[in-house]
Image: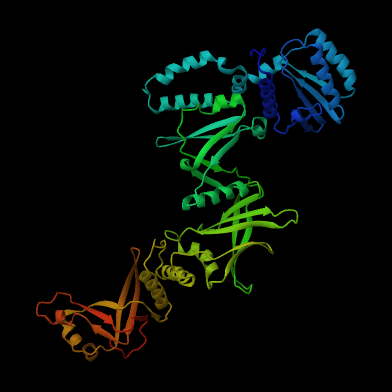
C-alpha cells in the first residue's frame, strides 16, 4: 500500500497519467496548463468518448475541491462524451459517495460517472514498481535494496550464473527509476553509454527532457566545418552525428526535478567526452522504390537502376530517407523538405560508394552498370516514379574510369563462367591486374586484347634452346608470335585459359648472354621486352605460325 498523503500533487498526477496511458495506449493527453476543458486524458471507444479527470487529493474533499471537480465535469459535458471517470488516491466516504452519485450524476444526466480511488490505484501500482518508486521516492522498498546489498558486495563465486542474477536484479531496479523513461546501458572497454527512450508512446510529452548543448566551431578548423555541416543537416533533416568534447562549451538539461535526480549524473561524477545526436526512425510505409538515373547534359537518360529506401528520420525542416542497391555498394541519403509557402520541395541527395572488394561480380554488376558510359558533365538523378527529386554528380569509383571498372567486373564474371568457379572480387587490385583480367576475358571470347604488358617471361626446354637462340627475329629486335598453354592466377584462383598466342611487332631478348653461358639453369627462362609497343593476347588462328619451344 502506498502512502499517498502529503505527496507532491504534480508528481501524483503525472504518475496516475502514466498509469492510465499504459493501461490504455490509445488515450490522448490534454495539456491542462492551457485550459483542458475539464479533460486530462480522453479515449475514444466503440461506446463513445471516455474522459479521465485526474486529481491528487488524498484527504477528505474540501468544499473548494468539490467545486473544482464540479467545474471540470461541467466543462467536460460540453463535449459529446459517454463516460467521465474521476481518478484520485482517495476512497470516497459515505457523504462523498452521496455527493458524487447523487448531485454530480444528476448534473451529468445520461453520462456515466465512475470514481476510481485509492484501492484501485494501490492494486494497479503494485504491478508497476517504477510508478510506485516515482511516487514514494527514496523511501521506497528500502528493505529490498538492503537485501540486495549483500549480493552486490559478494564475490562472483558462481561464475556466469551469479553475473546473470545480479545483472537481472540491476536491470529490474533500473526499470524502476522512472515511470516515463527506460534507461539502457552499453559498455565499450572502459566507457559507458547511457540511452534514454520512452517507456510508452507519448512519455516524452508527459515528462519532457530538453537537451541544450552549446557548440563552438572555429573557422580555421577544417574538421569543425564538416562537423558543423553534419550537425546542421541532422537538426534540419534528421540523422546521426557525434560531436567530440572539444567542440562543446556547455551542456544543459531541462527536465523535472524527479527525473533529474533519478536519471542525470550529478555534477563532478562524469567526464564529458562527446555528444551523439541520433534521430529516431519512423519507417512506416517503407521500403520505397526509387530510380537512380545517369543523365547526360542534354537530358538523355543513359542508364537506370531501381533501389529501395528503407529507413526514415526527421528534423525541423524535413526528413532524410536512406537506402542502397541490392549489393550494398551504393548508399543513398535523400533529404526532402518543404520549401515554404509556395509548396516547393527542397533538400539534397548524397550517393556514397562502399567498394566492390570482397563482393561477387554478379551481385555488383547491376549497380556498376549505372555508371557505364558516364561523362564528366553527366549527373545522377533520383526519381520517384515520373517525378525527379534531386540530382548529384557521379561519384569516384576505386580510382578507375567508370567504363574500365565495369569492364573489369564483367570480365571477372565471364572468367568465372568459363572456369566454373565462383570467387569474390579482389580487394584493391593493381591497374595491371585489372588490364590482365579484361584481356583474359577477351581471349576466352575469341577476341584479341591489347594489354599494357611490356615484359614476358618464357620457359624454354633445354634441348630446344639452340634452335630458339638461332631464330632470326630474336637477333634483330623482330616480331614475336608465341603460343603456349596459359594458366593465370586471379587473387589466388588458378584459371587455365588453354592455348593463347602472345604477339608483339617488336621485341628484344633481354638475357641472351645468360642463355648462351655453358652453365645454364636446368629450365632456362627467356625474358622479352617490347620496344615501343605492348603485348597482345589472342587465340592462335595462324596455322602456319610456329609455336616457340
Specify how the rendered protein is coloured.
rainbow
For this orientation, the residue located farthest to the top is 94
- Residue 346 occupies which quadrant of the picture? bottom right
53 versus 391 height, above or below = above
Q: How many marks?
A: 0
Quarter of the picture holding the N terminus: top right
Query: Residue 202, image x and y in percent?
Result: 67, 34
355 versus 227 height, above or below = below
- Residue 426 occupies which quadrant of the picture? bottom left
| Left or right of 53, for residue 240 | left
Query: Residue 299, image x and y in percent?
Result: 64, 72
Query: Residue 361, image x and y in percent?
Result: 46, 64
- Residue 180 occupies which quadrant of the picture? top right
Frontmost residue, 487 versus 27: 27
334 versus 454 height, above or below = above
Quarter of the picture holding the C terminus: bottom left
Question: Is residue 185 visible in the rendered structure shown here?
Answer: yes
47 versus 241 height, above or below = above
Residue at image x 55%, y 28%?
Answer: 263
Query: Residue 511, image x and y in percent?
Result: 19, 80
Question: Is residue 549 visible in the rendered structure shown here?
Answer: no
| Left or right of 443, for residue 95 | right
Frontmost residue, 186 versus 35: 35
Residue at image x 57%, y 27%?
Answer: 260
Amino acid at each position: 500500500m502506498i502512502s499517498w498523503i502529503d505527496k507532491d500533487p504534480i508528481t501524483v498526477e503525472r504518475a496516475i497519467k502514466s498509469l492510465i496511458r499504459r493501461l490504455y495506449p490509445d488515450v490522448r493527453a490534454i495539456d491542462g496548463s492551457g485550459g483542458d476543458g475539464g479533460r486530462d486524458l480522453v479515449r475514444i471507444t466503440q461506446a463513445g468518448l471516455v474522459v479521465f479527470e485526474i486529481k491528487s487529493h488524498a484527504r477528505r474533499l474540501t468544499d473548494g475541491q468539490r467545486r473544482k471537480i464540479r467545474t471540470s465535469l461541467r466543462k467536460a459535458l460540453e463535449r459529446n462524451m459517454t463516460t467521465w471517470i474521476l481518478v484520485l488516491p482517495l476512497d470516497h466516504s459515505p457523504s462523498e459517495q452521496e455527493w458524487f452519485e447523487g448531485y454530480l450524476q444528476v448534473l451529468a444526466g445520461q453520462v456515466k460517472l465512475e470514481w476510481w480511488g485509492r484501492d484501485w490505484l494501490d492494486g494497479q501500482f503494485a504491478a508497476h514498481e517504477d510508478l510506485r518508486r516515482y511516487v514514494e521516492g527514496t523511501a521506497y522498498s528500502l528493505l529490498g535494496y538492503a537485501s540486495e546489498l549483500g549480493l552486490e558486495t559478494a564475490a562472483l563465486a558462481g561464475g556466469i550464473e551469479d553475473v546473470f542474477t545480479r545483472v537481472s536484479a540491476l536491470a529490474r531496479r533500473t526499470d524502476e527509476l522512472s515511470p516515463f523513461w527506460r534507461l539502457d546501458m552499453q559498455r565499450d572497454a572502459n566507457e559507458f553509454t547511457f540511452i534514454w527512450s520512452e517507456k510508452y508512446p507519448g512519455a516524452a510529452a508527459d515528462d519532457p527532457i530538453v537537451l541544450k548543448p552549446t557548440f563552438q566551431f572555429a573557422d580555421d578548423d577544417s574538421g569543425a566545418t564538416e562537423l558543423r555541416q553534419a550537425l546542421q543537416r541532422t537538426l534540419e533533416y534528421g540523422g546521426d552525428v557525434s560531436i567530440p568534447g572539444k567542440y562543446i562549451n556547455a551542456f544543459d538539461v531541462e527536465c523535472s526535478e524527479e527525473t533529474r535526480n533519478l536519471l542525470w549524473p550529478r555534477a563532478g561524477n562524469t567526464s564529458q567526452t562527446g555528444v551523439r545526436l541520433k534521430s529516431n526512425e519512423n519507417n512506416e510505409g517503407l521500403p520505397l522504390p526509387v530510380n537512380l538515373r545517369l543523365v547526360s547534359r542534354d537530358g538523355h537518360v543513359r542508364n537506370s537502376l531501381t533501389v529501395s529506401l528503407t529507413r526514415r528520420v526527421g528534423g525541423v525542416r524535413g526528413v532524410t530517407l536512406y537506402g542502397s542497391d541490392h549489393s550494398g555498394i551504393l548508399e543513398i541519403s535523400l533529404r526532402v523538405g518543404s520549401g515554404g509557402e509556395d509548396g516547393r520541395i527542397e533538400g539534397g541527395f548524397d550517393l556514397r560508394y562502399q567498394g566492390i572488394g570482397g563482393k561477387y561480380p554478379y551481385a555488383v554488376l547491376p549497380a556498376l552498370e549505372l555508371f557505364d558510359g558516364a561523362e564528366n558533365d553527366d549527373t545522377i538523378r533520383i526519381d520517384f516514379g515520373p517525378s525527379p527529386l534531386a540530382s548529384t554528380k557521379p561519384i569516384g569509383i576505386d580510382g578507375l574510369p567508370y567504363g574500365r571498372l565495369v569492364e573489369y567486373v564483367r570480365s571477372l564474371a565471364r572468367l568465372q563462367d568459363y572456369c566454373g568457379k565462383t570467387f569474390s572480387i579482389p580487394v584493391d587490385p593493381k591497374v595491371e591486374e585489372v588490364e590482365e583480367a579484361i584481356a583474359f576475358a577477351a581471349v576466352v571470347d575469341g577476341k584479341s586484347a591489347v594489354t599494357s604488358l611490356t615484359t614476358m617471361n618464357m620457359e624454354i626446354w633445354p634441348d630446344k634452346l639452340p634452335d630458339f637462340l638461332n631464330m632470326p627475329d630474336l637477333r634483330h629486335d623482330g616480331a614475336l608470335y608465341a603460343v603456349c598453354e596459359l594458366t593465370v592466377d586471379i587473387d589466388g584462383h588458378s584459371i587455365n585459359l588453354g592455348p593463347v598466342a602472345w604477339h608483339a611487332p617488336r621485341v628484344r631478348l633481354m638475357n641472351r648472354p645468360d642463355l648462351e653461358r655453358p652453365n645454364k639453369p636446368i629450365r632456362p627462362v627467356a625474358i622479352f621486352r617490347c620496344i615501343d609497343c605492348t603485348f597482345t593476347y589472342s587465340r592462335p588462328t595462324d596455322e602456319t605460325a610456329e609455336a616457340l619451344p
